[in-house]
């Protein structure tokens, strides 16, 4: 296999833009898709350089990876249909694996911060639960509250679901994953969830960030499982790639992904 040409971050970015503009002008949809994928490989090499350069923050790499995912998501929409040709399905598998590894990489870049958020949130909710139990352990008017009045609100399954927030999709991902809890402003430093539970704004924003970061991992696994299922239709093709490039896993490096993808592209162009 040809060795990956080395560029600076700016060089990879410029080459990626050149290839993307070339793809924009191509009329053959299949060839256009392969060129877009080549551009995406240059963009993630740019992101990989951002990671390794102490002059850039991890957020810079994450933004590059996230923007690149949008290109690949578009390709998946074109080539993942059940009626697609064999080559379309092979490209779709490659796209799913690409998305899986990029989302896992973004999760790993956020993992340390996400672990810290998890600890802070767990401590907060344990403290809140303890406080609520202490408040309810003695209530001078409790003897009057045993029989609800006609106007008392009654709990319902719908109310229980609503109290933990809404469900939706996150970012550039195709799967439905819980989004951050929706809220309405209750005053300085407080938010209220859609079901009426008040939380401090600081905690609310930490919950939102935690959900966003966790979504990367969940989406990665979802894409990987889709790739595994679809690859069964072309086992011989991917077995040949594996023999040449080695096994690609969810924990493979960006460089491993690029090498694997470039070999797949060479074979797809030759078919």
Image (cartoon, helix red, strand yellow):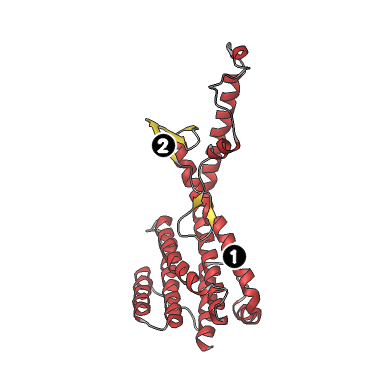
Q: Which of marks 2 and 1 is nearer the N terminus?
A: 2
Quadrant (top left/top right/bottom left/bottom right) for the C terminus: bottom right
Q: Compared to 224, does 181 lie above or below?
A: above
Q: Name the residue under label 2.
A: 184
Task: Report whether residue 104 is seen.
Answer: yes
Any mark on residue 224, and which? Answer: 1
Mark closer to the observer (2, 1):
2
Q: Residue at (51%, 81%) from the top-left corner?
A: 265
Q: Where is residue 254 in the image (x, y as percent from the top left)?
A: 51, 68
Please tell me which residue lies in front, 166 or 228: 166
Please tell me which residue lies in front, 25 or 262: 25
Q: Is mark 1 on a helix, strand or loop?
A: helix
Q: Residue at (65%, 82%) from the top-left corner?
A: 236
**Label 1 CA crowd tier, 10 Å (few <14, some 14–19, many 20+):** many
Q: Compared to 260, does 63 lie above or below?
A: above
Residue at the front extreme?
150
**Label 2 CA crowd tier, 10 Å (few <14, some 14–19, many 20+):** few
Task: Report whether residue 1 is seen.
Answer: no
Residue 150 in which image quadrant: top right
Residue at the top extreme?
140
Residue 55 in which image quadrant: bottom left
Please tell me which residue lies in front, 49 or 227: 227
Q: What element carries label 2?
A: strand
Q: Compared to 85, does 100 lie above or below?
A: above
Q: Residue at (59%, 65%) from the top-left corner?
A: 224
């Amino acid at each position: 296999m040809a060795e990956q040409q080395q560029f600076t971050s700016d060089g990879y970015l410029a080459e990626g833009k050149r290839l993307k503009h070339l793809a924009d002008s191509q009329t053959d949809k299949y060839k256009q898709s392969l060129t877009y994928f080549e551009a995406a490989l240059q963009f993630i090499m740019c992101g990989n350089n951002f990671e390794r350069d102490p002059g850039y923050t991890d957020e810079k790499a994450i933004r590059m990876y996230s923007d690149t995912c949008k290109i690949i998501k578009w390709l998946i929409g074109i080539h993942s249909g059940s009626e697609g040709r064999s080559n379309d399905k092979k490209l779709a598998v490659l796209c799913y694996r690409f998305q899986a590894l990029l989302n896992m990489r973004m999760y790993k870049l956020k993992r340390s911060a996400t672990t810290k958020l998890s600890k802070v949130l767990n401590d907060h909710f344990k403290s809140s639960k303890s406080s609520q139990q202490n408040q309810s352990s003695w209530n001078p008017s409790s003897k009057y509250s045993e029989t609800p009045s006609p106007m008392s609100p009654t709990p319902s399954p719908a109310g229980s679901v609503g109290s933990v927030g809404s469900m939706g999709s996150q970012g550039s991902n195709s799967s439905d994953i819980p989004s951050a809890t929706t809220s309405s402003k209750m005053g300085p430093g407080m938010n209220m969830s859609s079901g009426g539970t008040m939380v401090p704004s600081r905690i609310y924003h930490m919950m939102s960030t935690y959900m966003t970061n966790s979504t990367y991992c969940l989406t990665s696994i979802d894409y990987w499982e889709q790739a595994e299922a679809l690859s069964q239709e072309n086992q011989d093709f991917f077995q040949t790639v594996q023999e040449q490039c080695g096994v690609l896993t969810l924990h493979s490096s960006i460089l491993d992904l690029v090498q694997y993808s470039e070999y797949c592209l060479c074979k797809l162009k030759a078919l």
